[in-house]
Structures are given as C-alpha cells and as structure tokens.
Amino acid sequence: MKLSKKINFSLITTLVLFIGCTSQYAFTFDEEEAKLNEKPLYRAAIIDRFFPPSEPFLNAKDKESHTWMYGLVDVDRDRVKEPYYHGDIVQIIAASPQIAFTRYPIEGKQKPMKEILTNLRVILARMPTLPVDSLVLSWESSTLISAFPTPFEKRYSERYIQVLKAWGKNDEIWSDTYQVIRALEALTEQGVKVFTIAGNSGARTVNTLSFAKGVTTVGAKEPELSYFITNNVFVDVYEQAAYEIKRIDNQIGQTVGYDINNDGCEDIPLALISRTKQTTLPAKVWPPIKGSSFAAPLAMKKALLNLQDNQEIVCPTL
C-alpha cells in the first residue's frame, strides 16, 4: 500500500513536471510567433504647411481667408475650402498604422527655404533623443537646367551644389537652399531616408534639393503630367502624382466622407466638409489634386513598409 502511494505520487509529480515544461515551451513558442508577426513601427517627419497654423485665427473671416489661400480642396463647391492644406494631403497619402508622424510646419512667417532650414536644424538636433527613420520634403527650389555646367549628369552633383553656394553669396534664397542641401545630407548620413520631389516647374528645370547626396527624388508615374512635372537625370523613382477624390457611401447609401488616394479609407470625414450650401455632394471632386508633391509621400510609404502595388491596405487613424 505504501509502495502504491509512492508510485502514484511519482506519477503525479512526473505529470506536473511534464505539463509545466510543455506549458513553458508553448508560451515560448507563442512569444516567438508573436514577435515574428509583429510589424515594425517607423517615425517619419514632414516639413510642410498644415492646418491649423500654430497661431490662432483672429476671427472667422481670417480663418476663411487663410483656408481659401492655402486649402487644396473644396469638396462641395461652396467656395469654402475644407481644412486640408498641402502638408495634410501629403500626410494622408503617406499614412499607415505603422508610421508615426512628427509635423514640422512652414508657417509663412519667413521665406519657405528659411523655415525649411530652421526645421531641418531642429530635426538634426533632436536625432539623439527623437530620431526619425524618414523625412518627406515635398517642396522645391527649382531653376533651369541650363544654368549649370554641361554635361548635366548626376555624378556631377557636387559641382552644381558649388554653383548654388556661389549664387548664395548675393542671394539669400540660394544661400538657404545650399544650407538646406547640406542639412539633408547630414540626415542621410545618419541613415534617414529622405524623399523630395522632382518639381512642378516644367520639363527644362531641376529641383536643386535633389542634388543632395543620398536623397531620393520622386517624379510622376503618369506620362500625361510631363508638361509640368519635371523629369531629369536626378529623378530616382516614379509614383502616382494625380489623385481623384471620391465620395464614400455606407451600405444604405449615406455619405460618410471622401477618399483621397483610392484606398477605400475615409480621408475627409463628412463632419469636416463646410457644406454652407445644401447641395448634393459630388461622387468625384474636380479637379483632381496633382503634382510631384503627392508622389513623394507614396514613395516613402512604399520604401519604409516594403509595399507592392495593389497590396492590401489597412486604414490609418489620422
């Protein structure tokens, strides 16, 4: 009888140990599997003009005037633009649940290149404590290609940068442009993926920011936009640059908002559309928004997330 109890106790002990070990291995396996399935998160900076500006509007009229000047979309054609500025659209196109954005606004208090330079210096100063993986600068400082020595080839970019430096001795804008280029290079040297635009100033021009070493310059995939979007030896990749904004209706036919980049996501919610006139909301907004400014954020998103065309999209929370 005593022997039987001893055997039973041994069996129980063995079972407990076995179950404990099995549970431990199962937990470890689940943990490893979770790590494999976990998607990486990225930090991206955007230097651009956003709504609302940092300083409050003086009154409703001031807000309306400011929004009309800088807003890009009037969905319902009531001559009151929706609160979406250039940078807001750029961020919507770049948005993903895996990307966290830090906005560095262009306020209009100084010349744009001066504000861009100031923002770049802030980003560089923050890199030790608030690093970023990527930067989208959908802005240009363009001039004629013929202003530079021939042959005009990418391998001679430093020559062209020195031309800008010389111009900068007598022109503040080109001085700022030269310093912006050097700041962009300082970021790429730290491993930051920097994206800028081909430019929207015509076929014979170049966005001089694309001279910066390590920067990715993005042009338009659509050949029909070549009449104003630049395409030259400094353009590295081509992405969608024109976007037709489409209405989204729910299952019972009620409008819930508008989709900017055809991913099925509600980019402009109904609540943010001015609707000062009780008109039927259009199925599509005319004209489309277009420019290499809107190709660059898509290129950044694809590069960070290793996305392919027509890949399944998860709507971000903006």
Image: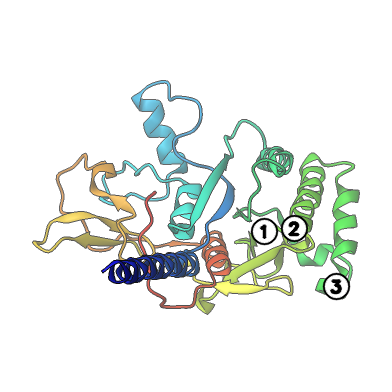
User: Where residue 300 sits in the image (x, y, percent)?
Assistant: 57, 63
Is residue 307 visible in this depiction of the protein?
yes
> What is the total number of numbered labels drawn onto the structure image?
3
Kindly state the secondary structure of the residue where label 2 is placed.
helix
Q: Is residue 282 left or right of residue 143?
A: left
Residue neighbourhood size for the residue with mark 1, other residues' Cα within 10 Å, grouped as few (<14), some (14–19), many (≥20): many
Left or right: 121, with 314 as reference point? right
Q: Nearer the viewer, mark 1 or mark 3?
A: 1
Spatial separation of the CA atoms under disc 1 and disc 3: 19 Å
Distance between mark 2 and mark 1 Cα atoms: 7 Å
Label 3 sits on what residue type?
A: Arg
Q: Choose between 128 and 303: the one closer to the eye.
A: 128
Q: Are marks 2 and 1 in contact (CB under 8 Å)?
A: yes
Specify the quadrant that holds the N terminus.
bottom left
User: What residue is shown with label 2?
Assistant: 188
- Say which quarter of the image contains residue 278: top left
Image disc number at residue 155:
3
Kindly give the residue lying farthest to the front in the view shown. Answer: 1
Q: Kindly identify the residue that appears in the image at 52 percent across and 48 percent down.
A: 101
